[in-house]
Amino acid sequence: MDTQLSIFGIEAHPPGPGDLDGLLAGGGQVVRLGGTARVSIVVDAAWRVRVLIAEFTRRGLATSWDKATIEGHFGVRTAYSSRLAPLGTRWLRGAVKRPPPDFFLDGQRLRLWCAAAGQPTEDGDGYSLHLGTEEECWKPVGKALAMAGLPAELLGVRAGGPLYRIEGRRRVAHLAEVVGDPPADVPPGMWPGKKVQDAKPDSTVPVSSKSARKREPGSGRPAATPREAVFPGEPGLFDL
């Protein structure tokens, strides 16, 4: 266990743009534009938006979010950045997303996946990581989970997926050690290894427009963000 943690845990390397591989393992998408790329993902709760914005900021990436077309969902995206260009090169075959041959999962990448699409099972003894719709991605992602010491069962749409389910308290405990402590905005019971308690209702507004504005590292000026859209009762939403 100690060897696995030293290799796969969040302490293994500092946060970086390459960690967004964890979002692409799930439902995340990457788009290239010239010598830059942008990563985006749709999430099902406001707290996930807040966590992802904080994680992107730690990696020096400007970000924005807005309402998704699915009721109760939100789209979170980075700005186009040359620092994300390697992800676009590695993951895209034309416009099709495919895991690169050397794809792997570690603590930083799994942490982002848990933040965007992780959910405990009803009995609390397992943990589910939701996938995207690209079936060709599922097998390589499952292999990467197994290599990280987290073998998981692939479940299809009829079983609430597509998702990988990590079963058993021991494996979930290993996942919890690998991804580290939960971010402050994660509701009780939603992070690996944390039992459900009396959860506080999640805010329906992920973050204010003021707190969503980030600065490019070292520039001393606000990062470029999409123009602010005005939605009554929902301050801080951005359009494309």
Image: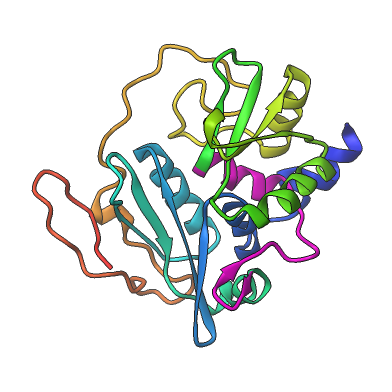
Q: Position of residue 126 (x, y in %)?
A: 65, 22
The residue positioned 16% from the left and 46% from the top of the image is: 234
Q: Position of residue 142 (x, y in %)?
A: 74, 45
| Towards the viewer: 163 or 86 | 163
Q: Residue furthest front?
A: 158
Q: Is residue 177 above or below residue 55?
A: above
**Residue 62 sits in quarter:** bottom left
| Magenta residue check for 112 | yes
| Towards the viewer: 3 or 120 | 120
**Do we see residue 15 in this rendering?**
no
Q: Residue furthest right?
A: 3
The residue positioned 59% from the left and 73% from the top of the image is: 88
Colouring used for the render: rainbow
Q: Quadrant of the N terminus?
A: top right
- Segment colored magenta: 92-116
The residue positioned 49% from the left and 57% from the top of the image is: 56
State left or right for residue 210 relative to residue 229.
Answer: right
State left or right for residue 84 relative to residue 151.
Answer: left
Q: Is residue 174 above or below residue 101?
A: above
The residue positioned 59% from the left and 20% from the top of the image is: 194
Q: Position of residue 154 (x, y in %)?
A: 68, 36
| Magenta residue check for 238 | no
| Towards the viewer: 45 or 55 | 45
Q: Give the mark count.
A: 0
Q: Residue furthest bottom?
A: 34
**Do we see residue 196 in this rendering?**
yes
Q: Is residue 159 above or below residue 123?
A: below
Q: Quadrant of the C terminus?
A: bottom left
Q: Is residue 233 above or below residue 97?
A: above
